[in-house]
Amino acid sequence: MKLDSKYKTCLKNGDELIIRSAVKSDAKDILEYLKKISSESDNLPYGEGELDIDIEEEEEYIVDIENDSNCIILLGIVNNEIACLGNIINESRERLMHNAEVSISVKMKYQSLGIGSELLNKLIGFSKDTKIIKNISLGVKEDNYKAIRLYEKFNLKKTGRNKKFFNINGVFFDQIIMALEIHSQK
């Protein structure tokens, strides 16, 4: 699904952030973004060089999401480059379709400017608008304190833990599962 319009706001540093739905023609830029963030952070489920996706596969994925009214990919654009990426992906099976997974990433040079808050706000708003999604959840590396604080700011609660989920250079880290019940929000 697409966001009905572009959302614009001013960041803490004065730059303009534009949040919009991803479209098929964004595939190449998204893959470059994913390559860049995978080299910047150990907080992702993949490391540098581990994503084996080509442009055609990414284009197909974007089109599939566009055609699903309960899923969305949002891009945050600053100075004509992708600064952040977020998505809501839900189950297509009837018994589980009220559940959705959220993921968010922000390029290192754009962190601590309020981008994560703007993006998460839009993703939660989208979830509420679907009238289908009742629960959103995500997994976060146990020592990603900035992300955990962000999610807690939006009332996501810690609901579980996957032990030794991440293996970063031979060191294991747990994944904290966090969730938000959409129907309980006013």
Image: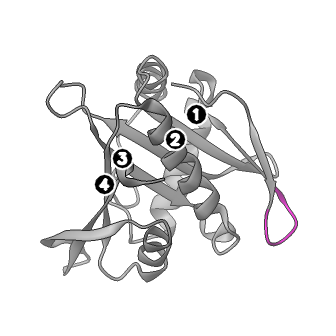
Tell me the tag on residue 28.
Answer: 1
Q: Nearer the viewer, residue 178 or 28?
A: 178
Identity, as a three-letter code, of the amino acid under mark 1 = Lys
Q: Earlier in the sequence, mark 3 or mark 1?
A: 1
Are circles 1 and 4 on residues that touch, CB within 8 Å?
no
Are circles 2 and 1 on residues that touch, CB within 8 Å?
yes
> Predominant secondary structure in magenta?
loop
Disc 3/disc 4 C-alpha distance (Å): 14 Å
Asked whether, in this view, residue 75 is left or right of residue 50, the answer is right
Q: Which residue is mark 3?
A: 183
**View extreme (right): residue:** 14
Q: Earlier in the sequence, mark 3 or mark 2?
A: 2
Q: Which residue is mark 4?
A: 137
Disc 1/disc 4 C-alpha distance (Å): 28 Å
Percent from the top left, x then y, of residue 160?
17, 69
Secondary structure of the residue carrying numbered label 2: helix
